[in-house]
Amino acid sequence: MEIEYQMIDTVADLEEIAGFLEREKAAAVDLEADSMYHYKEKVCLIQIATEKIFVVIDPLAIKDLSSLNPVFSNPKIKKIFHGSDYDVRSLYRDFKIRINNLFDTELACRFLGIKETGLQAVLKVFFNVDIDKKYQKKDWSKRPLPKEMMAYASKDVIYLLPLANILNQKLSQTDRMTWVLEECEDLSKVRPALPNEAPLFMKFKGAGRLKARSLAVLEALLQFRKCVAEKKDRPFFKIIGNESMMKIATARPVTLRRLKNTKALSNRQISMYGSDLIKVVADSLKIPDNELPVYPSKKPPVLPNGAPKRIKALKTWRASKAKTLNIDPGLLCNNALITAIAVKNPGDGKSLETVEELKNWQKQSFGAEIIRVLKRTTY
């Protein structure tokens, strides 16, 4: 089935379509980006569908998307996404777009106890539609885009409005609408992480297990990879993968022969980066012991007397309640929140308000039960 849409690739067309969108009550939104192909990812397409309008916007052709701001910020227009966290961050990062009145169909599915919440699985269940995801990891920054990729991009978004309508009915029937809306409000405020001066190994899985010398080697390797990735405009994994980086950091080869023996790199990678890598390793091995990095250890907080017992009781309650509601226990109340409640140990509704991590929907729907669990555990 070929889907008709309007391609928007000029400021004039965008301003005109934004005027139409401002008169709509709801708009489904999806994005395509190029994180698999470039050092700095960017939004490459924005698909928007309403009951009357369906457009695909090319932000690579239109540098100024400010005419969309009133649409996304208008609280009277519901913006429907599926798995919105990445999209919300990306729209703010690239265009400073803020979203009011967000509805996330993936989150709604989770609160309804639907096990497989990926869009492909959900559309199959509710509309018996099969979406071929083979284009999901293609390079969306290429121009012109093949018709097949445009068809894929357009198909992803057109079902979100009817899907949202179905999920809204189910949420109302189960009295969970306020739960989802509060979570969606929080989702609408997520932002991309700010750059900082922390060592790169702080975001590298497994770095905490390395000894100081290997940690120094890893950091130097990560800095080298970052520099190469930026120059070549490629994502990190297309320069050297994380598993290979860890192998080199632990083996610490200082000759090409030893580097080859690690079997961490292909012949092509060794040809391109081998000499630089062994120099990076050799230089790291010369760092004085007193200047070696230390991975910060996170000591678990010292819990007050009785808190471990309360944590156990709350987890038992959570498991039972989640089973009754047919939702994931972590969605109902995650472990960090359970610990916070156990530490504060509120004895009534007023003291429950002091647990800042608790959402309103959790307090209103389960506050009394939580307090009863705590009282039974205390006495």
Image (tube, rainbow, N blue to C red):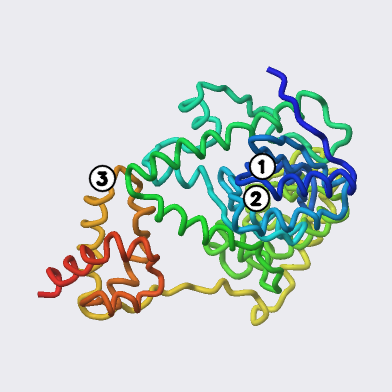
Q: Position of residue 289 (x, y in %)?
A: 65, 78
Q: Against 83, is 216 above or below?
A: below
Viewer can see residue 260:
no
Q: Position of residue 30 (x, y in %)?
A: 66, 42
Of residues 91 and 176, which is closer to you in this image? Answer: 176
Query: Helix or strand or loop: what does disc 2 sit on?
Result: helix
Task: Kindly identify which residue carries mark 2.
Answer: 87
Which picture quadrant has residue 362? bottom left
State if disc 2 and disc 1 touch (CB < 8 Å): yes
Q: Amino acid at mark 3?
A: Lys
Of the numbered discs in the image, which one, if any, rests on residue 260? none
Query: Helix or strand or loop: what does disc 1 sit on?
Result: strand
Name the residue at 55% across, 22% down: 129
| Mark toward the start of the polypeptide (3 vs 1) | 1
Q: Amino acid at mark 2?
A: Asp
Query: Helix or strand or loop: what does disc 3 sit on?
Result: helix
Comparing labels 3 and 1, the label whose residue is closer to the camera: 1
State if disc 1 and disc 3 touch (CB < 8 Å): no
Task: Kindly identify which residue carries mark 1.
Answer: 30
Q: Residue furthest top?
A: 1
Name the residue at 28% across, 79% down: 351
Q: Is residue 14 left or right of residue 79?
A: right
Q: How much space separates mark 1 and mark 2, taking CA atoms?
A: 8 Å
Task: Kindly identify which residue carries mark 3.
Answer: 323
Which quadrant is the C terminus positioned in? bottom left
Q: Amino acid at mark 1?
A: Asp
